[in-house]
Amino acid sequence: MIVWSEKSIELMCDFASYTHFYEELAKAIAPYIQKGGSVCDAGCGLGFLGAELARYGFTVSGVEKDELAAASAARLNEGAGHLKILCGDIKNLPPKEPYDAMVFCFFGDVFESLRLAKQQCKEEGRAILIKRDLTARRFSLKPTEVRTHTLSDTETRLTNARIPFEHFLLSLEAGQPFRNKQAAMDFFSIYGGSTGHIDEEEVLLRLVEGQPPFPYYLPMERKMGVIIIETKNIEWSEKNEES
């Protein structure tokens, strides 16, 4: 879960401007959305994925509960005719007409996502879940295990709940550019999962030369799984949620 602040927003904007991550992710999932359909980007953050999906002709509603992130998303995407940013709890912001698809990109619990899709998607719609394919934090300076909300965890829970799904794997360059050393230190402080001292020398050992205006770059490949679920197939027994 991202803790939004002026620093994290600046880092995310630099990431989006330097890499093709959101462009490539939108390209991968667009074929699974009805042509010209309405899409919800749940927990949209700064709206970068929603903006790329809008380029395919979809009408996109980006929903973000964090006020600072939502305000930044609205500002960054001002004038984007096919993208609307909504601020608030997505459970309290149902669409006037059901969505054709809902995209849950690193959104959290799988069953929370499916409940929302069942409530807000068309019966013939789709829920698209994007989950990290990893077992440890990518940006931690020390090995830190990750067990929940991963691709493996999600697929196991869906299988146990007998919910049919299809999926494919995706690997995209998702490194982080830095304008200076302090930005790199800030990044590891925010995303490294450590509350202690961040060693500058240890951080610099992870970096390579970047492209102007970013003299430093943290290379990283992000592996993920894209899970597609037909809304009509979203039925499960509550007792299977903890399986």
Image (cartoon, helix red, strand yellow):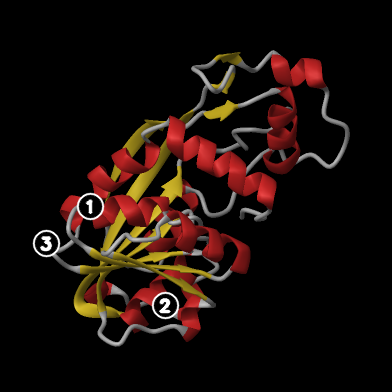
Label 2 to label 3, Cα distance in Å? 24 Å
Q: Looking at the image, is 125 positioned above or below residue 155? A: below
Q: Earlier in the sequence, mark 2 or mark 3?
A: 3
What residue occupies the far front of the structure in this picture? 79
Q: Nearer the viewer, mark 1 or mark 2?
A: 1
Which residue is disc 3 drawn over?
35
Residue 134 shows in this picture: no
Q: Point out residue 134 in the picture as x, y percentages from the top left corner.
A: 51, 38
Q: Along the horizontal axis of the image, is 89 left or right of 197?
A: left
Q: Point out residue 231 in the picture as x, y percentages from the top left corner.
A: 26, 73
Q: Which mark is residue 115?
A: 2
Q: Amino acid at mark 2?
A: Arg
Q: Secondary structure at mark 3?
A: loop
Q: Amino acid at mark 1?
A: Arg
Of 238 and 128, the residue lying toward us: 128
Q: Point out residue 56 in the picture as x, y percentages from the top left corner.
A: 19, 53
Which residue is disc 1 drawn over?
55
Q: Secondary structure at mark 1?
A: loop
Label 3 to label 1, Cα distance in Å? 12 Å
Q: Quadrant of residue 39?
A: bottom left
Q: Along the horizontal axis of the image, is 148 left or right of 79?
A: right
- Mark 1 surroundings: few (<14), some (14-19) or many (≥20) residues within 10 A: some
